[in-house]
Image (tube, helix red, strand yellow):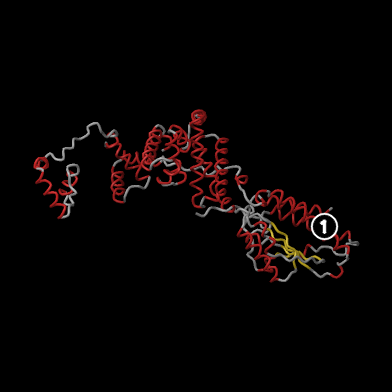
Amino acid sequence: MTKININNYPEYWIDFLDGKLSYEIEQELFDFLEKHPDISSELCDPDFPPIAPDITVSYDDKNELKSGNIISHLIISKLENTLDANQAKLLEDKISKDKNLAEEFDLYSKTVIKPNLKIKYPFKQKLKRGSVFVKYEKAFYAIAATVTIILISQFYLSYFKNDLRNNLKEIQTITAGLNSVESLNIIENTKHTVENKKFKEEKNEETQVNTSEIKKVRDVLDLPKHDDETSIPEKSEFLENLALIEITPIENRMDYNINKFDFTEFENSSKEEVLFTIEIIKTPQKSKIKNVLNTVEYFVKRIDIGEKYRNLKLAKENLMLAILE
Amino acid sequence: MCGMNTKQYNIVVDKFADSVYRFILSNIKDEFLAQDIVQDSFERLWLNYENIEFDKAKSFLFKTAYNRMIDNLRHNKIVNEAGKEFLLNTNIQYNQNEQMELSQILNMALLKLNETQRAVVLLRDYEGYTYEEISEITGLSESQVKVYIFRARQNLKNFLVNYKEIIR
């Protein structure tokens, strides 16, 4: 079946000139041309194909192609990393030899805008969605603080009512501080006051807290020593703060078994600063203390309390006040 | 397609809220409107987060914020007023102190650009987006993005020429 006809012969002819036709189609084309000598003579005209240039089409940005602008293009392409290695090398050579070009390059380099990282979106926390904890964290902490105060108050009441004190052995209170000295001060000062007041109320001040026997936990646990015992780094790391943990012998016993579930409520917290304080009352066996610290460290490494620290601190202060009362 | 969960959405907030805010604020110089646009963009992300992949969230946010910003610019012509005010303030500061930092001059220069040039060059420089990504965010073709970036840099450079002695 003949494929070539009066309408499509130019395409076949161009393909023939480009050497793209198969032998069969080529024969077919010649057959067609033999049958149409007028077309044949037209195709042999050196001006074929008769395509006239569209003189209305012009390149508007000719100026862009001129020397000054083409240099701008090259410089910007270099800044945009779109030049290949060869082009980049050629341009660098030119820049190194031409002072004006170097100045031009310098100016263009300054057009790369750096973001001002000090600008922060002020309401990021409000954008967060999801769990009840994330959305209502303030309420959560308020409730948690209240519940904690009630539970601990109950514990203290029952503790003194049953007069267990005489049966208790020496115990150590471990204060694991993961933040600034401010919070540690609160813990220590309040703790000693609480203990003193408690024992005074229990007649004759028989069981004074022996604060002189305070030992640094690092002596027990071989933790790295802090250079200056009295100063706390402004933004301290967890391990640095471990050196601040103190063991205070007192004469009453309170067991508290910490486990990983104590921390699950903070699983969704964000991570920017580690600011979390936990007070652990525990028996003094070295292995148990290490376990507790490992648990805390593991937890702290995975989470970030960020702004929530303020709420925790507030809860702690409330707790201490409640105990004092 | 696997969308995000709540945790991933909140990670997106932490990672990109600042950068979207910076991008919009640099474009419009209006803190309240910028905050509003960020808020709105995250609301839209939240409404769709189950259908948006975690990796696409940034692009979605910038695209949404960009479109919101363009709508505002076109309807309110805010940039003109804010820009004039900003330029005025900066120039006053310049006259008073007789010294300016490059960043201040670039801020002034940015306001001289048209909204599209400004947006594409900020997306490129602030976020390091590729031409393709900018094209996706702005709805321009890649070629258009290239041309806009080229023109923007040329205009910025021409502006800097006037302050050559100061920023040297």
Regarding residue B94, the answer to whether it shows in the image is no
Residue A17 pos. (x, y %): 15, 48
Q: What SS does tag 1 mark?
A: helix
How dense is the environment of label 1, judged by Cα within 10 Å: few (below 14), some, or many (20 and up)? some
- In terms of image quadrants, where is residue A265? bottom right
Which amino acid, mark 1?
Ser
A225 and B127: which is toward the camera: B127
In screen coordinates, is A59 left or right of A260? left
A222 and A92: which is toward the camera: A92
Q: Which residue is mark 1?
A: A153
A55 and A297: which is toward the camera: A55
The residue lying furthest to the front in this view is A1
How many circles with numbers are drawn on the protein? 1
> Is the residue A298 above or below the residue B143 in the image?
below
Regarding residue A3, the answer to whether it shows in the image is yes
> Is the residue B146 above or below the residue A130 in the image?
above
The residue lying furthest to the right in this view is A203
Q: Residue at x 38, y 43 (%)?
A: B142
Residue B10 pos. (x, y %): 58, 50
Residue A255 pos. (x, y %): 77, 66
Residue A28 pos. (x, y %): 14, 51
